[in-house]
Image (tube, helix red, strand yellow):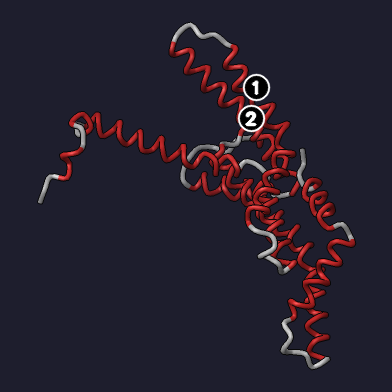
């Protein structure tokens, strides 16, 4: 069997080299996951799920492609999160750039402080959404899991929660809120589907696809009540800022 390690630089094969290689791979993996992790700290998931359920309720998924749902969700997220991001940038990155450090150790300490200050507005935002939705029990769920693993005492205030507890609790809360909003959107369209199906069956037109009749009715109702404005207003008002 040929030596498959022949293409690897010799400096990578020693203990120190292997450690450095693992660190590089971990760094690239984390960088690849950063956009997804960053989106999880926003209300984008709530918007995307509700808009996806709206598309499903209308029954015209081919008329609302994923790009439209994702794009509208991102635009709404930017509108809501812009003040939070501005505060995070000012408190973290901008303050770090304006500060001069005497040596490398001080610069590293300043960078750690800048990251912490930049994360504080995002943590406050997540705490606000948890409290507004009444989902503080999600924090208790992950705190109990953390305590069972012997990872220290629970913080006294929400703002002191580590991201390993706050982030999953926030994501779970966003899923719960999104499904509750989606249920309110789905029910009226479900009534239309049931009425159309009953009428077609009663008229002996069971071979006619109900979607052909229900879709125009759904669009008529949705347009007549200015459904897009109502949906966007409901989504924006569901976020506590």
User: Where in the figure is residue 234, as x and y percent of width and height?
Assistant: 81, 51
| Vertical position of residue 90 compared to residue 125: above or below | above
Query: Neighbour class for label 2 at 10 Å: few (<14), some, many (≥20)?
Result: some
Disc 2 on helix, strand or loop? helix
Query: Of the residues tagged 1 and 2, which is closer to the observer?
Result: 1
**Tag 1 residue:** 91
Q: Position of residue 81 (x, y in %)?
A: 70, 37
Q: Which residue is mark 2?
A: 120
Q: Is residue 153 above or below residue 53?
A: above
- The structure residue drawn at horizontal position 71% and vertical position 56%, both measured from the top left corner, is 51
Q: Which mark is residue 56?
A: none
Q: Residue furthest top?
A: 102
Secondary structure of the residue carrying numbered label 1? helix
Q: Tell me how far mark 1 sits from mark 2, CA to CA.
A: 9 Å
* Among the 4 quarters of the image, the one containing residue 5: top left
Characterize the local packing of mark 1: few (<14), some (14-19) or many (20 or more) Cα atoms within 10 angstroms.
many
| Residue 63 placement, left or right of 216 | left
Cβ–Cβ under 8 Å for marks 1 and 2:
yes
| Residue drawn at x 72%, y 89% as measured from the top left | 207
Determine whether 82 is above or below 219 in the image: above
Q: Which is more N-terminal, label 2 or label 1? A: 1
- Closest to the observer, 93 or 168: 93
Determine the image quadrant of residue 17: top left
Q: Residue furthest right?
A: 224
Q: Identify which residue is drawn at 56% across, 38% down.
A: 163
Left or right: 228 in relation to 66: right
User: Can residue 173 be seen from the camera position used here?
Assistant: no
- In-front residue for pair 67/175: 67
Location of residue 189 in the rendering, given as x and y in whole percent from the top left corner = 79, 69
Answer yes or no: is residue 198 visible: yes
Which quadrant: the C terminus? Answer: top right
Q: Position of residue 4 (x, y in %)?
A: 17, 45
């Amino acid at each position: 069997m040929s030596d498959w390690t022949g293409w690897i630089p010799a400096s990578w094969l020693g203990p120190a080299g292997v450690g450095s290689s693992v660190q590089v791979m971990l760094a690239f993996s984390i960088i690849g996951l950063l956009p997804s992790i960053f989106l999880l700290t926003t209300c984008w998931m709530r918007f995307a799920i509700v808009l996806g359920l709206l598309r499903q309720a209308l029954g015209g998924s081919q008329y609302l492609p994923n790009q439209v749902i994702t794009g509208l969700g991102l635009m709404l997220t930017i509108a809501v999160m812009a003040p939070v991001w501005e505060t995070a940038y000012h408190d973290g990155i901008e303050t770090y750039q304006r500060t001069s450090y005497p040596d490398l150790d001080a610069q590293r300490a300043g960078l750690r402080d800048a990251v912490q200050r930049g994360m504080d507005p995002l943590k406050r935002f997540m705490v606000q959404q948890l409290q507004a939705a009444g989902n503080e029990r999600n924090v208790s769920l992950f705190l109990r899991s953390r305590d069972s693993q012997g990872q220290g005492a629970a913080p006294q205030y929400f703002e002191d929660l580590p991201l390993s507890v706050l982030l999953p609790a926030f994501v779970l809360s966003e899923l719960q809120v999104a499904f509750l909003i989606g249920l309110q959107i789905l029910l009226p369209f479900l009534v239309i589907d049931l009425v159309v199906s009953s009428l077609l069956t009663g008229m002996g037109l069971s071979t006619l696809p109900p979607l052909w009749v229900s879709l125009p009715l759904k669009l008529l109702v949705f347009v007549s009540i200015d459904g897009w404005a109502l949906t966007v207003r409901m989504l924006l008002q569901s976020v506590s800022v």
